[in-house]
Image (cartoon, rainbow, N blue to C red):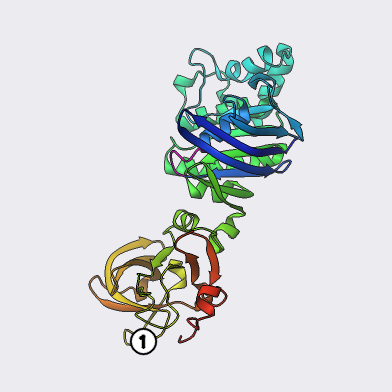
Amino acid sequence: MAGVELHGIRKTFGDVVALDGIDLEIGDGENLAVLGPSGSGKSTLLRIIAGLETESEGEVRFGGVSQRGVPPHLRDCAIVFQHFALYPHLSSLENITLGLRHGLGLPKAEAENRAHDIARRMQVEHLLSRRPGHMSGGQRQRIALARALARRSSIVLLDEPLSGLDAQLHAVLRLEIAQLLRSVGATGVNVTHDQLDAMAMADRIAVINHGRIEQVGTPDELYAAPQTLFVASFIGAPPMNLLPADARGESSFFAAVEGAGPGVTYGVRAEDLALVSDGSVGAWTLHGVVGLIEPAGRDRVVQMTTDHGDTVAFRCEVRGTPAAGERVAVRARPEDVHVYDSATGLRQGNAVTAPMVARRGAGVGV
């Protein structure tokens, strides 16, 4: 097995900078998700690891060994593509064994033994005689994954392999893929725009935006303490409520209260806001009018428009859900309120520890 190291990776296409100084280490046997919106550079990064694109600057290493000048077919990588990439005129068995026989040079018997072994583990052995046109999307994706894992490569690269599947199959396959990668001990790199996939499948997540890594951490770390405004707005469903202070230092949390200076954005998760009496006052209380109410299983996600004009989401139990148009108040604990520098987008701490708030005494009054 082998880990992956990326050092100072930069990729340009003419005047367009796709990747701008990527430094990332993926441990041996670790499953890492590269999460970001369309156009963020995540697929370009995957192609550079595979050798399908050449980095403009920097270096890729597998197990400490530089891959500079190593062509794709000689890199110890297997790739699962978004659109299956199966040969329609070949059976599933032939699709799995083709690369083993002609790429790795294995004898036919050994290649077929590998194919049957991985197909049995993925519960698709009964599909080996079928061609892709006679299988569902989920079955074809399982065969594509079996083809990649049959190579027994140290590194498995996944390029949004679940984006074309229906919701139920999507949820099942992401768990299967995560379990299979762990069972074979491969180092996995999964690029995706779907935070649920990243959260469910990965040991760690690297959030990428405009060709730069914004934050790397476990799913819990990214959710509990997003280090930039972008990560805060991208991770979570619903995403974190972000409430910027205006030039006078006023925000939905504060109205000309000492300690609420300009240049600050406050962030709070929907589940960290609790309904209180509409007459409540306090530094961390929001007042507003209920708008959209979204069912979320046992809970409801309620959208409210604050008196300051911000839209804020909070969660509440079904029985305690206010009605649309009703005036309500919600309150957060200061330790649950994240504080960001609006200019840099960087997290400064929470409303108790952030110097730009705590030193002014804004953490009081709850």
Badge 1 marks a residue whose secondary structure is loop
The one nearer the camera, 109 or 60, is 60
Inspect the magenta stretch and tell me whether residue 38 lies in it: yes
Q: Residue flagged by tag 1: what amino acid is it?
A: Ser
Q: Is residue 347 above or below residue 98?
A: below
Taking depth in this image into account, of 187 and 75 the one nearest to the observer is: 75
> Residue at 51% across / 58% down in the picture?
228
**Residue 56 pos. (x, y %):** 58, 29
Q: Residue at x 59, y 26 (%)?
A: 54
- Look at mark 1 in the image and give the residue it sits on: 280
> Does the rendering let one see residue 13?
yes
In the picture, measured across the screen, residue 248 lies left or right of residue 96, that is left
Q: Quadrant of residue 179?
A: top right
Residue 322 sits above or below residue 236 on the image: below
- Majority secondary structure in the magenta region: loop
Q: Quadrant of the N terminus?
A: top right
* Left or right placement of residue 286 versus residue 187 in this view: left
Name the spot of residue 285 as percent of width and height, x first: 39, 80
Q: Position of residue 137 (x, y in %)?
A: 46, 30
Q: Is residue 124 visible?
A: no
Residue 163 or residue 143, whichever sits in front: 163
Q: Which residues are magenta?
A: 37-41
